[in-house]
Image (cartoon, coloured by chain):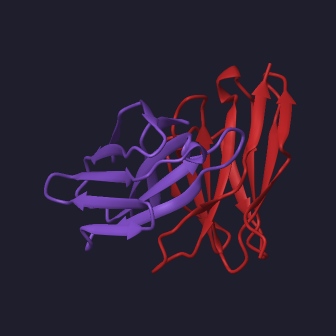
Chain colours: A red, B purple
Amino acid sequence: DAGVTQSPTHLIKTRGQQVTLRCSPKSGHDTVSWYQQALGQGPQFIFQYYEEEERQRGNFPDRFSGHQFPNYSSELNVNALLLGDSALYLCASSHPSGFPEQYFGPGTRLTVT
Amino acid sequence: GENVEQHPSTLSVQEGDSAVIKCTYSDSASNYFPWYKQELGKGPQLIIDIRSNVGEKKDQRIAVTLNKTAKHFSLHITETQPEDSAVYFCAAKRYSTLTFGKGTMLLVSP
């Protein structure tokens, strides 16, 4: 049973560029949440997707956007990258209700120079 | 919104000792409290969780307690082993959102 997978593992971008990160949920899960984890901090909630719609959003600017596909996989897009966007981006999958557990992928390490 | 405080930020113990990590939360609407272990270069791994209608839960060497009145919850690890060394995060869930503490770096010395 495959767990949550994310790609790429590492990414280096230049300030002002755009980036797309990808996530495939755990088998049987249909809800995907994205988190940003700065060095030495706990993960911070960006947004959650269910049934191809953004269901909940944290305190992140509109430069952060996402998408969920019919197969439940998801993308996180960040436009106009800032140096402060350098972080580990984590994807977590879960069921929408009745099962609160969220399972995380290994993350994508984004470095903005 | 929810705010989760976690203490201590670092914890050093000898192999075989017990370790306790404590968290407080602010929003009484939070109803699910997971604990994650994160090793270097990896994503957080769910190790134990507790729902708001339960006061205590145990799984082998780890246990979690919840005091809803005081809005406190704690992770207890007994008979610590060097492989328990990692960063541990507590979290509180309100609706569909997890809010995390800042983490505790646990170092278990042989």
**Can you give x and y, in whole percent of width and height, for residue A47 in the image?**
57, 53
**Residue B63 visible to the viewer:** yes
Q: Where does the C terminus of chain B fall, quadrant-wise?
A: top right
**Can you give x and y, in whole percent of width and height, for residue B93 in the image?**
40, 59
**Can you give x and y, in whole percent of width and height, for residue B4 in the image?**
34, 43
Q: Who is closer to the viewer here, A1 or A91?
A: A1
**Can you give x and y, in whole percent of width and height, for residue A18 in the image?**
81, 35
The answer to whether residue B42 is above or below residue B55 is above
Q: In which quadrant of the rendered view does residue A72 lie?
A: bottom right
Q: Seen in the image, is A53 located left or right of residue B14? A: right
**Residue B96 visible to the viewer:** no
Name the residue: 55% across, 29% down.
Answer: A40
Q: Seen in the image, is B46 located left or right of residue B10? A: right
Name the residue: 49% across, 44% down.
Answer: B88
Name the residue: 61% across, 41% down.
Answer: A36
Q: In which quadrant of the rendered view does residue B64 lie?
A: bottom left
Number of numbered discs overlaid on the protein picture: 0
